[in-house]
Amino acid sequence: MTTNRTAPRTGSRTIVGLHRWLGLGAAAIWLVQALTGILLAFHFEAEDALLTTRHTPTNLASIERRIDDIAAAGGDAKVHWIWTTAGLRDRYIIFFAAADGGDRKAYIDGAGTILRDRKADDYSFLALTREIHLTLVAGPTGHWILAAAGLLLVTNLVFGLVAAWPRRGGWRGAVVPRGRTASRAGLYSWHRAIGLWAALPAIVIAGTGALMLFEEQLRTAVGAAEVSLPANPAAGRPVGFAAAARAAVAAIPGSRFVGTTLPSREDASYYVWLRAPGELYRGGYGGSLVVVNANNGDIRGAWPATDADAASAFVGSLYPLHTGEGIGLAGRILALAIGVWLVVMIILGLLLWWRKKPRGRARRSTS
């Protein structure tokens, strides 16, 4: 968003100009993304803690009884899936249709005790923040706006890094801010220095976030086909959730249950997701899949994330890299810090543009 008063290197003026005008055009969306990203860095844990901080170990049989109770409510009642909250340990969400057909989410502890039951579209503050971060609460339209803005942000970060890259021997002076922000030269020095501190991790986080919004198209482009098995029609009463979850975990030793879809009459299969040893996920979610035959409890197939082909591994890496989960707690703290960094960079860039604008007008008025 800036130009260097000491004359940029030959060929960089165009890049500097593009950096400035691209930044101005999308600054509002980037600011929304950065602020919501900061709030979301640890929002799963925060939402769980607001319900209760009491820890109850997972008891699959107790959770199965809760699932059966919900499904037995009559009318249109049906359980669709159960998934970890990705927050505090041994917390889950059951997504189901109530007797009246309305979609609901029940938040439960490891023993199946309901901690909160609400309509699926009844957002808490943090859930609404997440929806803004993902779609601007505008459905597919917002999704595509954010995808385009994300790619633009990556482009602008690259342009900014190229424009700010110091000459040989000039790194020390470039990464140490000089002067006060009251002057335009000082403001530029701060903008450049802070930008150089974290531009590379910011490009990774912004880039993976943008690519996540193109996941279906990306899968097709790189040939990362999703697991697809023939339908498995129901043949009598299905194997219960607890037995299916245990079978899936046993299929990938050392793994931890993450979530599963429930079988239907058309396809009596549990698609069970796990977090397996050695995979990139370090926190709540997981990238390994086991499909369990609900007719007899047999394993229809197992796909550990660590055995994925390069294309599937690339697509599967986007979320843990974007959230920092791929390197654990330190990575998540880094992702939060990058959100703060981006807010600071946007504000400094806008201040630089604003301070340049009157000077330009003054020069034109005296010409």
Image (tube, helix red, strand yellow):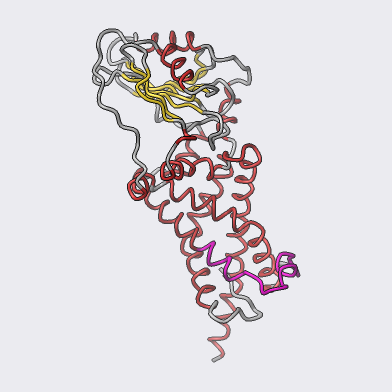
From the viewer's perspective, is 302 left or right of 269?
A: right
Please give the range of residues in magenta: 156-180
Q: Position of residue 4 (x, y in %)?
A: 63, 76
Residue at coordinates 48% horizontally, 18% vertically from top-left? 250
Does residue 104 appear in this view? Answer: no
Q: Position of residue 247 (x, y in %)?
A: 44, 16
Q: Nearer the viewer, residue 357 or 312?
A: 312
- The quadrant the N terminus occupies is bottom right
Q: Position of residue 59 (x, y in %)?
A: 53, 11
From the viewer's perspective, is 337 left or right of 292?
A: right
Residue at coordinates 69% horizontally, 69% vertically from top-left? 189
348 shown above or below 216: below
Q: Position of residue 356 (x, y in %)?
A: 59, 75
Q: Nearer the viewer, residue 295 or 283?
A: 295
Task: Assess whether residue 342 is covered by the magenta stretch.
Answer: no
179 shown above or below 234: below
- The quadrant the C terminus occupies is bottom right
